Image: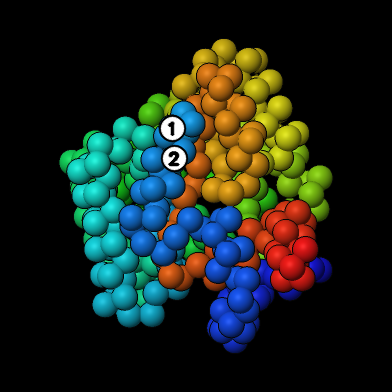
Amino acid sequence: MLRNALLAAARSARLKAMALRLPVTAAVVRRFVPGETIAECLAAVRALAADGLHASIDFLGEDTTSPAQAAVVRDGYLEVLARLAAEGLTGTAEVSVKLTALGLGLPDGRGLALAHAREICAAASAAGTTVTVDMEDHTATDATLGVLAELRRDYPDAGGVLQAYLHRTLDDCTLLAGEKSRIRLCKGAYAEPAEVAHQTREEVSTAYVACARVLIAGDGYPMLATHDPEMIAAVAELAAQYGREPGSYEYQMLYGIRSDEQRRLAAMGEAVRVYVPFGTDWWGYFVRRLAERPANLLFFLRALLGR
């Protein structure tokens, strides 16, 4: 119930405005979002690289309401990629894009989002890095996978994301586990009805392991996004079972969450990529992080109370 309330709050402009007035909010948000500017984002990427960690950069924004706003997001990604290339960071960092931020939800938005995503993929390819297309709530799943399929005709290293809590995802994993296919598997962070998604922690964990098995047994490049110690251990067991060497798959985690574990895995020789968001449109992302883990919410409440 608390999780669903928080996920509803992620879409509330009124609650966002109230939070912005709290004196501690900016400091607390910095735990999960390293800054609002490209310079602040790249400083975080460099710090991660010094610890042997890779990065996937997200220019925060979703539910774009105009073509002009979508173009601003596209241009932001193009600038990020230019800066990565100029600073020699394309070997350690890629970008993650949300299609709704590129206009997917607008009238005739599929073509607009695809065109913007193509430009970003072209810039990433020229810079020597990759793009991963983020997944959003279930209403965008078919459209997102359709755009991904079109992008892969010209940019076969374009990555996708699947959410284990959706009932459909095991079948999607089977379809997308082919050679060179880059798929990030996460549990899922949106409030979804029981008709389309598992509801209990146990069901979601079971689904995650089943999906991870399909991807690890396949011929692609699995990207296993999880902070759950049980899932991390399950991935290690599956990798050993199917003869996966470190570097033929990777773990992924979010900036500011279980940083010690990120470094521990990297020190063991595992490939670890950290999802690094930046920008002014941080509210929805931040609240979803609070909803995912009680420890994150406790951290926020303690900061509010000055403890």
What residue sits right under mark 2 in the picture? 47
Determine which quarter of the picture holds residue 221: top left
Dot 2 crowding, Cα within 10 Å, few <14, some 14–19, many 20+:
few
- Quarter residue 72 falls in: bottom left
Dot label at residue 269: none
> Residue 140 location, x and y as percent?
49, 63
Q: Is residue 139 above or below residue 230?
A: below
Q: Amino acid at mark 2?
A: Ala
Q: Where is the N terminus found, in terms of image quarters?
A: bottom right
Q: Nearer the viewer, residue 238 or 260?
A: 260
Q: Residue furthest top?
A: 243
State the residue at coordinates (77%, 63%). 307
Give the labeled residue for mark 1: 50
Residue 9 point in image, percent of width and height? 65, 76
Answer yes or no: is residue 189 visible. Answer: yes
Q: What is the CA distance from the residue labelled 1 to the residue labelled 2? A: 5 Å
- The residue at the point 81 percent across, 45 percent down is 202
Picture quadrant of residue 212: top right
